[in-house]
């Protein structure tokens, strides 16, 4: 299972890098061609033509690794 660390995309049209920082934080680039939503809870993308309108920049961590790391510390 992956945990969302950063929910970020870059609009290929205007170059804006936009980030949703919390749940229901709907952010749109300055040209309006793409949007991001969901914060650390979920990934939602909106776009005008296709997924080619944006570049995915989100960062994740493996939640299972964190659990395993904690077990090894005990």
Image (cartoon, rainbow, N blue to C red):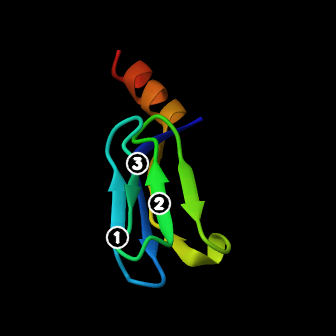
Q: Which residue is label 3 attached to? A: 26
Q: Which residue is label 2 attached to? A: 35
Residue drawn 46% across the image and 47% down it: 37
Q: Position of residue 58 (x, y in %)?
A: 45, 58
Q: Position of residue 6 (x, y in %)?
A: 37, 51
Task: Name the mark on residue 17.
Answer: 1
How much space separates mark 2 and mark 3, taking CA atoms?
Answer: 7 Å
Element marked by disc 1? strand
Within the image, what quadrant is residue 4 found in? top left
Residue drawn 44% across the image and 70% down it: 32
Find out whether the residues at labels 1 and 2 contact each other: C-beta distance under 8 Å.
no
Residue drawn 43% across the image and 19% down it: 71
Mark 2 packing: few (<14 Cα in 10 Å), some, or many (20+)? many
Q: Position of residue 67 (x, y in %)?
A: 46, 25
N-terminal-most mark, 1 or 2: 1
Q: Give 64 or 46, whichever is nearer the viewer.
A: 46
Element marked by disc 2? strand
Find out whether the residues at labels 2 and 3 contact each other: C-beta distance under 8 Å.
yes
Q: Position of residue 2 (x, y in %)?
A: 54, 40
């Amino acid at each position: 299972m992956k945990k969302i660390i950063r929910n970020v995309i870059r609009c290929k049209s205007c170059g804006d890098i936009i980030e949703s920082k919390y749940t229901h934080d709907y952010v749109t680039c300055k040209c309006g061609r793409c949007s991001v939503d969901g914060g650390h809870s979920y990934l939602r993308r909106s776009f005008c033509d296709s997924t080619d309108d944006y570049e995915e920049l989100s960062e994740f961590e493996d939640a299972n690794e964190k659990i395993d790391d904690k077990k090894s510390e005990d």
